[in-house]
Amino acid sequence: MKKNGTITILRKELARFFGDRRMLISIIIPGILIYVLYSFMGSALHTQFSTEDVSVSAAVVNLPASLESTMASTVGVTEYESEAEAMQGISAETADICVVFPADFDEKVALYDVSSGAAAPMVEIYYSSASESSLLGFELVSSLLDEYETSLVNKWDINAGAAVYDLISETDQTGSIFSMMLPMLLLIFLYSGCMAVGAEAIAGEKERGTIATMLITPVGRNSIAMGKIAAVSILGLISAASSTLGIIFSLPKLMSMDSMNISGGFYSMREYLMLGGVILSTVLVLVALICVISALAKSAKEAQTMLVPLMIVVMFVGVSSMFGGAAQTELYYYLIPLYNSVQCMSAILSFSASSGHIVLCIVSNIAFAGIGAWVLTRMFHSERIMFSK
Amino acid sequence: MTEVLQVNNLRKTFRISAKQQKLERSVEKTRIAVDGVSFSARAGEIFGLLGPNGAGKTTTMRMLATLIRPDSGDALVDGASIVTQPTEVRSKIGFLTGDLKLEEFFTPNFLFDFFSDLHKIDPAVRETRKKELFDAFGVHEFAEVKVSNLSAGMRQKVSLAVSIVHNPDIIIFDEPTNGLDVLTAKTVTDFLLRLREQGKSVLLSTHIFSLVEKVCDRVGVLINGKMIVCDTLEAVCDGLPLEDRFFALYEKEVGALQ
Ligand SMILES: Nc1ncnc2c1ncn2[C@@H]1O[C@H](COP(=O)(O)OP(=O)(O)OP(=O)(O)O)[C@@H](O)[C@H]1O
Ligand SMILES: [Mg+2]
């Protein structure tokens, strides 16, 4: 087996970080912190704002099997044979709302073809805006239906026929907050994760005089640069994954939702694949940048100091996704590193991504990372950078 | 005997940073660290580079190890030029200076494997080589102890072993006994003598006269970046103790010592 310098160096770097419990904790801890903090904030907010529990009773007609358990866990369900019987419950004030499914709802949904142009199976909700518990019941059930709806592959609005309500369902809200905040948070987590590792792996080694031991071996400078970039990317990704999991698990608590329905069937494989590609290529750009800056520094501490201003730039770019409105359509926007990633991520998360933009973003990111790797190699060749006093 | 290392008129100037200027209370913008140094070393010989602090010993050796490039001049390491064929040179030499450190986190065993991988050494060859070198320096006892927990002497032994994993023919050691107690220093000097027996060419820098007298076949005296004399030990000493000869040369070159 021919030994590859890049792999050897990558293996050493990973052994270094995975073997050291302190290092490992420093990579994982941000995610745990985020989870604990956000969960606390969430439950604090929840107890502060939630009013006394109002129990809602719903009169339901033709309750489909697929929604039985979710309905029952949300509201008190009483089933009726016909719409008229159910409505009597409302007038007698034994029910707060009345939900009418078409007969054989599940079969109709399964058979329904969006392109056919035929009317979709529709659910009707009757409620009284005068009653607080009725209003709440309506809110709960319509958000439940929205969730159900997004879980279907062929999407259409099952309560489209109803009047226009000024209520935004909870899932919608979470979804849009998610697509607003996640790109920024991801970018910041990726950056801070790679920053600590990069400063340590390059400037730290320079500081301790260990990098020169590699420079005197026949292994090429470019192998060293690639090995370092690969190692920092992997570790940065792990760190960012930890932070992201922290967010995903704590977000429902923060928004005082009890289930995790946003993380599960919310996005399809295509979204996850695109997101993965964009994140990976973004990490490469960030790591190349961080490595080049770290190589300029004489010590890990100095590198950290030099990397902070860039962190601010990264945050700024990330924040742009929150106020940018709709995703950019001009192609050249997708050639700007980091900004293109943020644009793509928010587009993917809000289901409006175009494959062309994603590909352009990934390709340009890889090109930028390649330039960074080349610069890093040149820097490893430079004695003024490697051995300055 | 064949000259495996030919050094030709090497010159190196450093730019002095503002920080370094302040630190050293000097106003010079550049410093000539190595000023036209030439010498040659042969197989089966130990060449001693003798000089006071700041003479340019480390700088000369770093140029030979291709860590830094000379401003002018060249050196041939077993026929390979340090300027135009640095990769070949790196596989031909073993190099050790005080400012090359081992990563504290790893064990000697891991580091030995790591560097032998960087030198693309076959695992089977590596194991025999490891046994041989770890035996010579007594590294076996602490082969699985992290470098951070090793004493200075132990570290130096590991550094020496690791620097010659690839069994190079030309070995460049910068002050290899620096900071070692007499026992550890003896292990190192004994090893240098063994290398000579094996027909290796050893280039050694030091400011310890007794070490030069004990092991070196030929000596070059470096003062202020210039090679003042370069000859066999006998010829340089000319019947006097090396120390006395050195001070005489130094006074002639720089002026009387206070
Ligand atoms: N990277 C550098 N930048 C600036 N000046 C340098 C650099 N490296 C060495 N010098 C200067 O060059 C001169 C020679 O240094 P060198 O380290 O080669 O001396 P030396 O003979 O090894 O001394 P010592 O016995 O102290 O190790 C010194 O004046 C030193 O300050
Ligand atoms: Mg020195």
Image (spheres, rainbow, N blue to C red):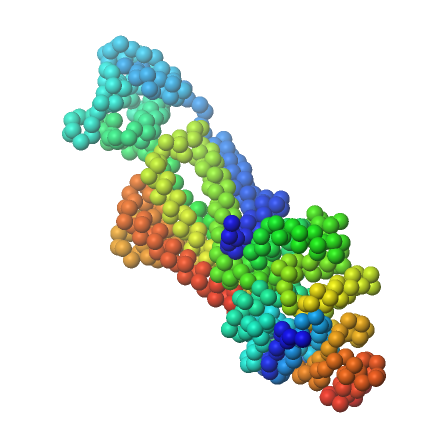
Can you give x and y, in whole percent of width and height, for residue B181 in the image? 81, 62
Q: Say whether residue B119 is visible.
A: yes
Q: Residue furthest front?
A: B1
Where is residue A168? Give x, y as percent: 32, 34
Q: Quadrant of residue A374?
A: bottom left
Viewport quadrant of the N terminus of chain B: bottom right
Q: Residue at x 38, y 55 (%)?
A: A366
Q: Quadrant of ligand 1?
A: bottom right
Q: Quadrant of residue A371?
A: bottom left
Q: Give the residue at x 36% y 15%.
A: A77
Q: How many marks?
A: 0
Q: Is residue B241 above or below residue A345?
A: below
Horizontal side of residue A133 vs B182, given as left or right: left
Left or right: residue B131 versus residue A121 is right
Q: Dividing the image into 4 quarters, which one contains the C terminus of chain B?
A: bottom right
> A20 or B147, which is in the foreground?
B147
Against A182, is B66 above or below? Answer: below
Residue displayed at 37% across by 44% down: A275
